[in-house]
Image (cartoon, helix red, strand yellow):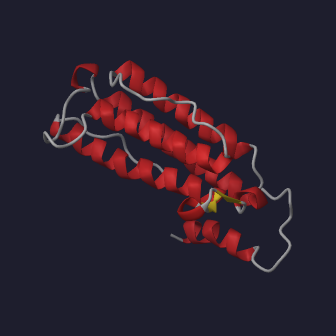
Amino acid sequence: CMKLAAVLAVPLSCVGLACAQDSHALVDAMVKHYQASEELTLAVAEAMPAENYSFKATDAEMSFGQQMNHIAAANANYCAAGLETKSPLGKLEDASKAAAVKNLNVAFDFCLDGLKKLTDAGLMKTVGSGAHQRTVFEAFWGGFTHTAHHRGQAEVYLRLKGITPPEYKF
């Protein structure tokens, strides 16, 4: 909790002060955690056998493959909004293991490449308009937390198939 508090305090420390334009402390922390999220998400995706990618915990839920594609598409969309560009992913209809893992890699590469080009001041830039206005930081943080939510759901799918999910690393 202390590390997260320190990371979140960085943007607040810039309020009312001149932030160094080339500072990367917050960017570096976000890159570190996005890389950990990528590693765990791909490990979860790889843990499910290809023949179980159509498995649903209940009829009302997405299949495991659809969950993986949903993580990829949403992550790319959040990052695209923050970077004010277009997502590298279109509509994802193929929910096979091969396609979903490829989509996850594309999304995480897109987000990490974009993050690495930012400065801490760039993370504080406001993007979007109207009800969709937010900082670049909030866009990336939204993608990060959304990934964690759906990855957690996917881990339940693994357990329902008798598979122990990969261990979480911070």
Residue 130 falls in image quadrant? bottom right
Q: Is residue 39 left or right of residue 15?
A: left
Residue 20: x percent and y percent?
86, 64
Residue 44: x percent and y percent?
36, 36
Compared with residue 159, is residue 118 higher up or lower down, i.e. above or below? below
Q: Is residue 1 visible?
A: yes
Residue 158 falls in image quadrant? top left
Name the residue rendered at 39%, 33% in the picture.
69
Name the residue rendered at 83%, 68% in the picture.
19
- Which of the pair 156/94 is nearer the observer? 94
Compared with residue 146, is residue 100 higher up or lower down, i.e. above or below? above
- Which of the pair 94/158 is nearer the observer? 94
Question: Which residue ends up furthest to the left in the rendered image?
Answer: 59
Residue 10 falls in image quadrant? bottom right
Residue 49: x percent and y percent?
27, 23
Residue 139: x percent and y percent?
57, 55
Compared with residue 115, is residue 89 higher up or lower down, i.e. above or below? above
- Which of the pair 4/67 is nearer the observer? 67
